[in-house]
Amino acid sequence: MCLLKLPVSGLNFWNWDGDIIIHDPIVPSSRPVVNSRNKKNYDIDVREFLVSDKNSVMGKTLNEDIIEYIRTIPGGRPDVFLSQQRYAFDYKAKIIAGFVAEKIKYHAKKGNDPWLFPDETLFLKMGDCEDRALLIASLLAASGISSYNIRVVLGRLNSISKDNITTIHDHAWVMYKNEDGLWTLLEPLNIRDKGYKHELKSIPDNSVQPEKFDYEPFFLFNQHHLWAVNRQGTDSHTFEDYMNRREKWNKFHPKFWGAVHQSIINDALKGANQWFIQTLNGYFDSAVHIGFIKVGPTVDDIDADTKHYTPLEHFDNCFIDESWDLVNQRLAEFKSDSHIHIDSFARAAHAIADFYSHTSYGHFAKFDSNNPNLFKLYDKNNPDLNKIPDYSHNSDFDLVGGKFSINGNIWKLPRTEIAEIWNGKLISGRYAQDNDTHSGLINQLFEEGPSHIPGNLIDANFYKRGGVPHHNQIAVDSDTKSTDHILYLDKTNSPTDRLLYSNQFNWRKQTAISHIKKAFWDNLKK
């Protein structure tokens, strides 16, 4: 549906609360007892790898090291981190994930390696995905977040190449239930190159590079319980068998995870503090592959949250001015406190990208006088267009001739009326209108089907929005033209042709990057 391509899938298909409690959570420690001549591994309860929420080492790290880390971030809020006010718990989670990402180096261990206790990981300042996940979860609990809102996940991450070649990686990560009651993913390998350059030699240059990622949990645990995840027909293991095969684990390497972060956020925010980039990346992954940017992980992505869908978040259904009003409201919130309201910027950035992807602005826009591959950034108060929008019969955006569909359930007038209503205005495609969902199982079950337009946006004139084309027919939100898209051509001989789909995609993407960059720096609270 959207300009932001999301290569991570699987998150919405699982019960992150856990399905079945396992009453025997014992695993081999993979380490002998200290000072023992007997080199045999001893048994340990897996929950012991998560330290008590009263652990003083965690407390010292939170009160000293992490507070110092917050002060290195422009606009950092140590007072909020130490409080229990609204937004404080989500802020703690974002800060802790950022701290571990930046301050704990990735260090791969081969074979049936012993897990490090969080105190040990902090001392060594390095660890693999399991060690880092255990540390994140322990710091979350020590910060005051209830352990019932924390899960360490043991499972696998399938990386899938452009050629549909799947490589299975054993992996560990953390799920955190945020203040809105939604499970969000904290990825332990969400790190920069400098943290693992010394590890890259172990991976050949001709390794298959992933195009998308699929998370699959097997087991979840916190300080109180271990759960199995109901896999319903997929391969499953007993917990003992799963842990005993650790020496054969093919661990997920951060070199591959770096592929996720080739994104509009990273391109737009070059030079910004890494915490902002990492945190914002986390808003743009979901269970459904939609749109066009590749970024990092969270369950409650703006697109995936179909329960709270509104066209104003996406510039759908011709709500152009109303959507810009919401964007400006979000940016004002971000400007008032860039740490507390970083989610407001994430939503604003998403909407800005969707404006260029979903609306007819790119069809009628002027090019930037300094960059022929960039449209002028849109200004609601001064929409300086290349030509007045024309949707009349035989125009190059003809809404009258029957090329595009209409929603006949609410549009009852002749097609000629469509052009008369919308000429001179920017439009966007209809989406989530009742009894109008486009075909396709994924679309019907996970995208448009569960989305519904809020009642307060439906008035006596809403019928006019039933006369515009469906979103899928005119949106430019993927690097390849979908079978539903009608407006633009597959190929021409002109690199400047406005009717060439690939040209429109590139121009719109670069303009979105430029606009998001400007919005960030103009509104960042220093």
Image: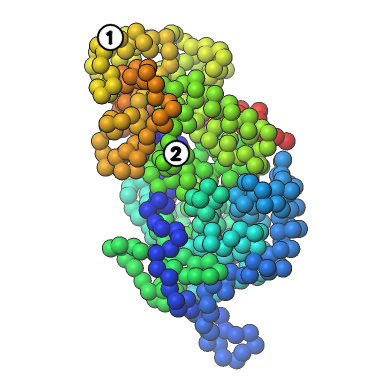
- On screen, residue 336 versus residue 201, left or right, reads right
Q: Nearer the viewer, residue 497 or 140?
A: 140
Across and down, in percent, residue 155 comes to 43, 63
In this rendering, the answer to whether 48 lies above or below 510 is: below
> Which label's residue is closer to the chain start, 2 or 1?
2
- On screen, residue 56 versus residue 3, left or right, reads right
Residue in view at x 26 percent, y 42 percent: 441
Across and down, in percent, residue 15 comes to 41, 58
Disc 2 marks a residue whose amino acid type is: His
In this rendering, the answer to whether 9 lies above or below 52 is: above
What residue is pinned by disc 1?
A: 416
Q: Residues within 10 Å of mark 2 (few under 14, many from 20)?
A: some
In this rendering, the answer to whether 167 lies above or below 450 is: below
Q: Look at the image and name its color scheme.
A: rainbow
- On screen, residue 17 versus residue 78, left or right, reads left
Residue in view at x 51 percent, y 28 percent: 352
Distance in Å between CA atoms under marks 2 and 1: 34 Å
Disc 1 marks a residue whose amino acid type is: Thr
Q: Nearer the viewer, residue 517 or 177?
A: 177
Residue in view at x 26 percent, y 39 percent: 440
Task: Say which mark, if any, is on residue 308.
Answer: 2
